[in-house]
Image: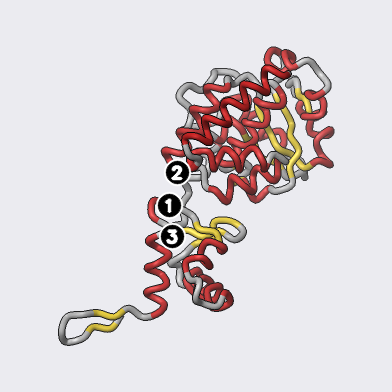
Amino acid sequence: MKEYGNGHTIRTIDESFYQEMSENMQNGDELSIQQIYSLFPEVNRKTVSWRVHKHVQQGKLYRTANGYYALEKSDIHNAVGYDKMQKKSKEVYDAVSDYIYDFYVTGLDSLIGEILHLPESYPVLIVVEEVGMNEIRDVLEEKGLIAFTENNMKTKEKNILKSKSDVIILKGKNFSLSTKHIAQKEKGFVDLYYAVTRLGYSVSIQELSRIYHSMERNRTNGKAKMKESAKDRGISTEINWLMELSKLPEKALEFMSYQTEKTNDWV
């Protein structure tokens, strides 16, 4: 930044570029590369990309996910860690760690800090490479734990999950959504949402909603990670809708509520 005798300062192009982005990234907000392009419609996209890359190299911007950037590199999205997990979750973690398959514990164990009341005992959710799901189930059952894969659960009565299961094994592909084999909070929420809405997992819809609103308050529901998590779980439409819900006008929400009621009447 240059300073002149009259006290006025003139920002360089790079400084102006960074200033414009930082004003749109307050409070931990992320911007996609498409959003950054839209901030500079008169600038060639290759030039914008080069400037973004330059600021990343300088440590002024951080790549939070594929195509998303933020001002700060933060650990708030990470789970609180192994020491805070319930005893059964630690037992599962330790057992699976001895095998070659990639994995992470997910769901409630990764959302400690976002939950008002953590149940004393609940089925452990764990994500494992698909090729190793059955072997890991056998390993856990040898240790006296009742384990089901998600495919097992879809063919059984849902009350079995609530009353008998110790571990639910979900398949996953994107293991970058975890830290030290514990899901990052966005992935933990998406997996929990899936288990509640698809598998009859014993967390109420009200509690699931409270967890999500807690993540909104704490800004631990990063858009990029939520989208990647939803894609990995195959429920992108629902999670994208959830993230955009707060932006809808009142009349749109009223219409959607009416349509929901009508749909329930038709079922």
Question: Which residue corresponds to the image point at 62% horizontal and 25% vertical from the top-left?
Answer: 260
Taking the image as shown, residue 134 lies to the left or right of residue 65, namely right
Label located before the other in sequence (2 or 1): 1
Q: Which quadrant would residue 156 be assigned to in this image?
A: top right
Q: Which x, y percent locates residue 211?
A: 50, 30
| Disc 3 residue type (three-letter) | Leu
Badge number at residue 219: 2
User: Looking at the picture, how far across and down is residue 213, in whole percent?
Assistant: 47, 33
Where residue 141 sits in the image (x, y, percent)? 78, 23
User: Do the CB atoms of the residues marked 2 and 1 lie less than 8 Å apart?
Assistant: yes
What is the x, y in percent for residue 97?
A: 70, 39
Q: Nearer the viewer, residue 244 or 73?
A: 244
The residue furthest left is 6
Say if mark 3 contacts mark 1, CB within 8 Å: yes
Tag 3: Cα neighbours inside 10 Å, few (<14), some, or many (≥20)? many
The amino acid beneath tag 1 is Gly
* Type of amino acid under label 2: Arg
Sequence-earlier tag: 3 or 1: 1
Few, some or many residues within 10 Å of mark 2 (<14, 14–19, 20+): some
Residue at (46, 72) in percent of width and height? 58
Rate crowding at label 1 as few (under 14), some (14 to 19) or many (20 or more) other CA atoms within 10 Å. some
Q: Quadrant of the N terminus?
A: bottom left
| Disc 2 to disc 3, C-alpha distance | 14 Å
Question: Badge 3 is on which residue?
Answer: 71
Which residue is labeled 1 in the image?
28
